[in-house]
Image (cartoon, rainbow, N blue to C red):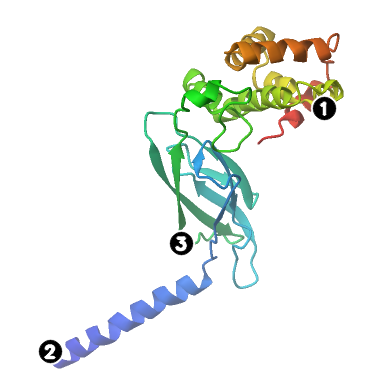
Amino acid sequence: MKFIFTFYLLLLIPINSFAKKNDDDHKPLADLKLILYKTKHYAPMPVDLDASKSKAKDGKTLKAYEIDFGDGSPIVTKQDSVVRYVYEILDDSRQKKFVVTLRVQDSDGVWSEPNKKTLILTQIPEPGPTNNSTLLGVDIDGNGIRDDVDSYINSQFKNNTTVQRQAIRQLAKFYQTNFVASDDKQKLIDLFKNDGSIYCLTAQFPNSNTVADITHKIQIQYVNTDLRADAFSKIETNRSGMRYKLLQPASLYPSKCSDF
């Protein structure tokens, strides 16, 4: 009897193992790729979380993508295979590691095993004294915003949402492009005509007084030296009389958010 019992246990282990393997063979496969929008790994960093190579098996289809962004924000479930997300460092950490986790669900409701990717980002360093010796200053991460203004947005608006901070960054980028073109009247006019930053800001902050207050705060950051104040005065003169027009319907405002 003892021999028979031992033989039964030996048979039972591979049978259970085979059953688990068989279940795994029918699970969908999660595939995750992180597409970064800047070559230098500084925060804030827009990232496309691309799950388009994920697959369902046995002729089934994928119906849901579950993403844990790895930054403490809530886990979300999406129907789109590609999701844009902005990773930020809003505390005093110089560097942070984010472990992004993807699971996919097939049309039978079966979930895949998790697929994890690691993203390591560094905080933008404080710019040195050369930042204020030129008109454009230092933009080490190449996102079109002066580094000290980027840091100001992170600290001043850290209690706002990521999307709201992105709208403010879009406004800051508009100011920076104006300084680049400060001697070119026609280019300044064209920039103003094509600008969507105020509309985007309005979409995120419906109160007009809040929009005016944010615009004023960012403007103050950009005219922090005599050289920049003179350039801004020239910009205002070159586009004198130009005004933003109200968009109709109001649902068009979010479409002007170009950076996210």
Compared to residue 187, the image places residue 17 above or below, namely below
User: Of circles 2 and 3, which is in front?
Assistant: 3
Q: Quadrant of residue 52?
A: bottom right
Q: Quadrant of residue 219?
A: top right
Residue 219 visible (yes or no): no
At 80% across and 10% down in the image, what residue appears?
Answer: 237
Q: Which residue is mark 3?
A: 113
Give the Cα distance between marks 1 and 3. 46 Å
Q: Secondary structure at mark 3?
A: loop
User: Of circles 1 and 3, which is in front?
Assistant: 1
Give the Cα distance between marks 1 and 2. 85 Å
Q: Which residue is mark 1?
A: 194
Near-viewer residue (165 or 150) = 150
Q: Residues within 10 Å of mark 1 (few under 14, many from 20)?
A: few
Q: Secondary structure at mark 1?
A: helix
At 68% across and 15% down in the image, what residue appears?
Answer: 206
Compared to residue 72, the image places residue 154 above or below, namely above
Near-viewer residue (13 or 214) = 214
Compared to residue 29, the image places residue 100 above or below, namely above
Instruction: Verify CB contact (< 8 Å) between mark 2 and mark 3.
Output: no
At 51% across and 26% down in the image, what residue appears?
Answer: 130
Q: Quadrant of the N terminus?
A: bottom left
Q: Residues within 10 Å of mark 2 (few under 14, many from 20)?
A: few
Q: Secondary structure at mark 2?
A: helix
